């Protein structure tokens, strides 16, 4: 399996090189030359454990890693989760809720980043050398990435977060890690600013090469690949339970990485009838899928900070498929977006961008109301991001979301799996505002009196580059 850039100006590379490259030298994102059709394997895969399924899927893409080594990587990566199933699914009301928060940092990012951290270590053991990771986080990626590589030899990690724009517990999860190879940077700006600094730095190919930079953000193909696994696993469980032949997923998203994994799983043959894309007030993605225009706006701070994003880094991968895998068309769209802050694609005969997607948004009041409803009716506490996903899924089933494309009866006949992206205890104030009481988790409670380390830095590419050079 070889990997190419969405912008078409990079020679194909193997899986290990794709992982170490992160962002392509031409500014594009890496994707496999072709996606395997796994339709004939679904019946067999439905009987597998999560770890066995992960091995089967990843082995199709990581063809340059010996099977025995890959099996060990997978086993080690999911041994850190506190649930035997890794991602257990529970029925709550009308929905199957897929709990993705049973890893070390209580967020869905652990599912991919525990694997990626071990993968980086493995590749460096094979090749030698050093890796200096530069990442940007709106909340959960940073702590998950840090916990994936803390203390690992020959790896340093530099994580930028927008100062004052993550939840206090999210910040504490990052800054309380005092290992010598961990560096936290509080940037005077938004997450989009942090992400722009990261992409600009990676775009300086000479600097990137000279300082052995790598990425843990979802621009790294291995992140997206690891996330496809739980779409297969959850779909198998839901179809087994209900007897349905297809499923739908509701996915809260800001950076388009999580829902992209579902999109790719569907392209590989998983019977997903609908991907319900849910955003908060930062709704560039829902506006695109409802109206065909992807246009920037100011970032609005919300109760779901991991979705407070206006430029979704993985969106380019989707657009690549949308324009027929044509690098020239894709590059023209992205160049236009860079110049004008917007791009547009034509709607189809159904008046949608893509019939696979339905999209909606949930604002602060709707988020709080959804958390309260599920607590009061089902004794189940949702984190704010998951609440946005549940709210939009409810709107879809009731026929109130835009671009539903199917009848209400048909919408009720298919099981809906909602991705629960973080443990509610990570968002103390939002939960307190919604239900009048706090939710705790021992991992987070243990952070209360811990020492922290973090450096403040200007919203400036050169300042970040200088910091990197001074600490490598």
Image (cartoon, grey):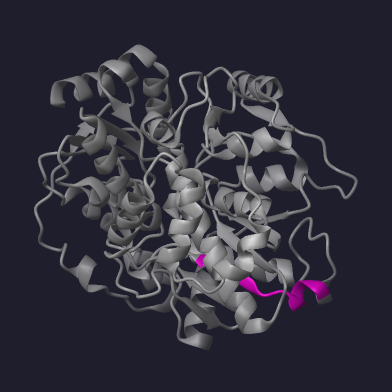
Note whether 401 is above or below 195 in the view shown: below
Left or right: 242 in relation to 222: right
Residue at horizontal 69 percent and vertical 29 percent from the top: 343
Q: Quadrant of the C terminus?
A: top left
Asked if one can make out residue 105 in the rendered structure from this viewpoint, the answer is no
Where's residue 395, x and y in %? 70, 67
Where's residue 164, x and y in %? 31, 45
Residue at horizontal 54 percent and vertical 82 percent from the top: 91
Question: Which of the pair 113/20 is nearer the observer?
Answer: 20
Question: Which of the pair 276/235 is nearer the observer?
Answer: 235
Residue 370 on the magenta segment: no
Residue at horizontal 74 percent and vertical 54 percent from the top: 356
Asked if one can make out residue 345 in the rendered structure from this viewpoint, the answer is yes
Left or right: 408 in relation to 254: right
Which residues are the magenta region? 410-419
Tell how many labels: 0
Quarter of the image for residue 87 reads bottom left
Quarter of the image for residue 431 reads bottom left
């Amino acid at each position: 399996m070889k990997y190419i850039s969405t912008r078409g100006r990079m020679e194909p590379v193997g899986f290990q090189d794709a992982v170490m490259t992160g962002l392509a030298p031409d500014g594009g994102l890496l994707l496999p030359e072709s996606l395997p059709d796994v339709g004939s394997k679904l019946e067999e895969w439905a009987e597998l454990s999560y770890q066995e399924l992960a091995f089967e899927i990843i082995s199709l893409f990581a063809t340059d890693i010996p099977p025995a080594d890959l099996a060990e990587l997978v086993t080690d990566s999911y041994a850190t989760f506190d649930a035997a199933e890794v991602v257990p699914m529970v029925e709550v009301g009308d929905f199957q809720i897929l709990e993705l928060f049973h890893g070390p940092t209580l967020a869905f990012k652990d599912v991919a980043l525990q694997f990626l951290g071990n993968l980086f270590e493995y590749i460096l053991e094979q090749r030698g050398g050093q890796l200096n990771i530069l990442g940007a986080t709106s909340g959960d990626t940073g702590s998950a990435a840090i916990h994936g590589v803390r203390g690992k030899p020959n790896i340093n990690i530099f994580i930028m977060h927008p100062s004052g724009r993550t939840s206090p517990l999210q910040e504490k999860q990052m800054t309380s890690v005092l290992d010598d190879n961990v560096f936290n940077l509080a940037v005077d700006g938004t997450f989009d600013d942090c992400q722009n600094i990261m992409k600009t730095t990676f775009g300086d190919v000479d600097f990137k090469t000279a300082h052995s930079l790598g990425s843990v953000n979802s621009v790294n193909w291995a992140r997206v690949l690891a996330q496809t696994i739980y779409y297969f696993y959850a779909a198998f469980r839901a179809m087994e339970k209900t007897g349905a032949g297809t499923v739908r997923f509701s996915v809260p998203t800001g950076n388009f990485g999580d829902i992209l994994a579902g999109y790719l799983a569907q392209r590989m043959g998983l019977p997903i009838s609908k991907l319900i894309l849910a955003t908060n007030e930062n709704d560039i993605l829902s506006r695109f899928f409802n109206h065909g225009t992807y246009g920037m706006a100011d970032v609005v701070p919300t109760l779901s900070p991991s979705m407070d994003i206006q430029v979704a880094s993985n969106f380019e991968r989707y657009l690549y498929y949308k324009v027929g895998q044509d690098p020239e068309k894709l590059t023209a769209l992205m160049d236009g977006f860079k110049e004008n802050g917007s791009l547009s694609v034509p709607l189809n005969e159904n008046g949608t961008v893509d019939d696979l997607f339905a999209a909606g948004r949930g604002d602060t009041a709707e988020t709080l109301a959804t958390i309260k409803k599920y607590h009061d009716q089902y004794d189940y506490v949702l984190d704010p991001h998951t609440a946005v996903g549940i709210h939009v899924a409810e709107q879809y089933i009731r026929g109130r979301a835009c671009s539903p494309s199917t009848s209400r009866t048909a919408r009720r006949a298919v099981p809906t799996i909602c991705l629960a992206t973080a443990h509610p205890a990570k968002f103390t104030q939002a939960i307190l505002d919604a239900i009048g009481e706090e939710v705790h988790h021992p991992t987070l409670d243990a952070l209360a009196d811990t020492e922290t380390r973090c450096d403040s830095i200007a919203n400036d590419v050169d300042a970040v580059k200088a910091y990197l050079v001074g600490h490598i």
